[in-house]
């Protein structure tokens, strides 16, 4: 993973502020490739309640401003049937966790 500990903490704080403290955040895409350069930050967010478009937009804008990188968020309600985009990233996402 190419995100720093600081970036990971910022992502977790921002996503949980918008989606709730129980939101699970996973990273997928180009930021997982240690040998890569550039790229956007692709996040899969799983929530207890149905995620709204507004929540996703606010989280995306805040993260892009804070990280100075493009951000894509795929949001999904825990236990609901997965959409095509959620199925596409399943198995290729890595959970983000705060540093101890």
Image (cartoon, rainbow, N blue to C red):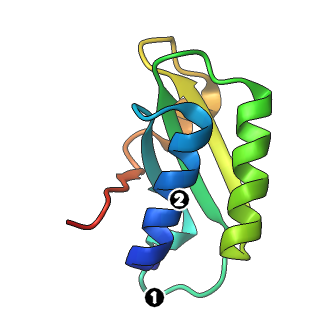
In the rendered image, which quarter contains the N terminus? bottom left
Q: Position of residue 96 (x, y in %)?
A: 37, 56
Mark 1: secondary structure: loop
- The residue sitting at 36% across, 54% down in the picture is 94
Image point 42% across, 13% down: which residue? 79
Q: In the rendered view, would you say 90 is above or below 98?
A: above
Residue situated in front as seen by the camera: 13 or 41:
13
The crowding category of the residue bearing disc 1, from other C-alpha atoms within 10 Å (few below 14, some 14 to 19, many at least 20), is few
> Does 55 appear above or below 97?
above
| Rendered image quadrant of residue 32 | bottom left
Task: Please give the label number shown on residue 61.
Answer: none
**Viewer-nearest residue: 95 or 64:** 64
Residue 11 numbered mark, or none = 2
Count of labels in the image: 2
Q: Is residue 70 visible?
A: no
Q: Position of residue 29 (x, y in %)?
A: 54, 61
- What residue is at 59 percent from the left and 87 percent from the top? 37
Residue placed at 78% from the left, 28% from the top?
53
Q: Residue 4 location, x and y as percent?
A: 43, 79
The label shown at residue 35 is 1
Residue 67: % across, % down: 66, 73
Mark 1 or mark 2: which comes first in sequence? 2
Q: Is residue 54 visible?
A: yes
Furthest-top residue in view?
A: 80
Dot 2 crowding, Cα within 10 Å, few <14, some 14–19, many 20+: many
User: Which mark is nearer the camera, 1 or 2?
Assistant: 2
**Gap in Å between the C-alphas at discs 1 and 2?**
22 Å
Which corner quadrant of the image does residue 85 belong to?
A: top right
Left or right of residue 76, residue 66 in this image: right
Kind of element beneath mark 2 = helix
């Amino acid at each position: 993973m190419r995100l720093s500990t600081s970036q990971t903490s910022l992502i977790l704080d921002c996503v949980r502020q918008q989606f709730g403290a129980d939101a699970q955040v996973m990273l997928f895409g180009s930021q997982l490739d240690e040998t890569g350069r550039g790229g956007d930050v692709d996040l899969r967010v799983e929530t207890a309640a149905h995620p709204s478009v507004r929540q996703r937009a606010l989280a995306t804008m805040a993260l892009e401003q804070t990280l100075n990188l493009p951000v894509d968020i795929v949001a999904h309600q825990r236990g609901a049937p997965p959409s095509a985009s959620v199925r596409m990233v399943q198995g290729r996402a890595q959970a983000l966790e705060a540093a101890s």
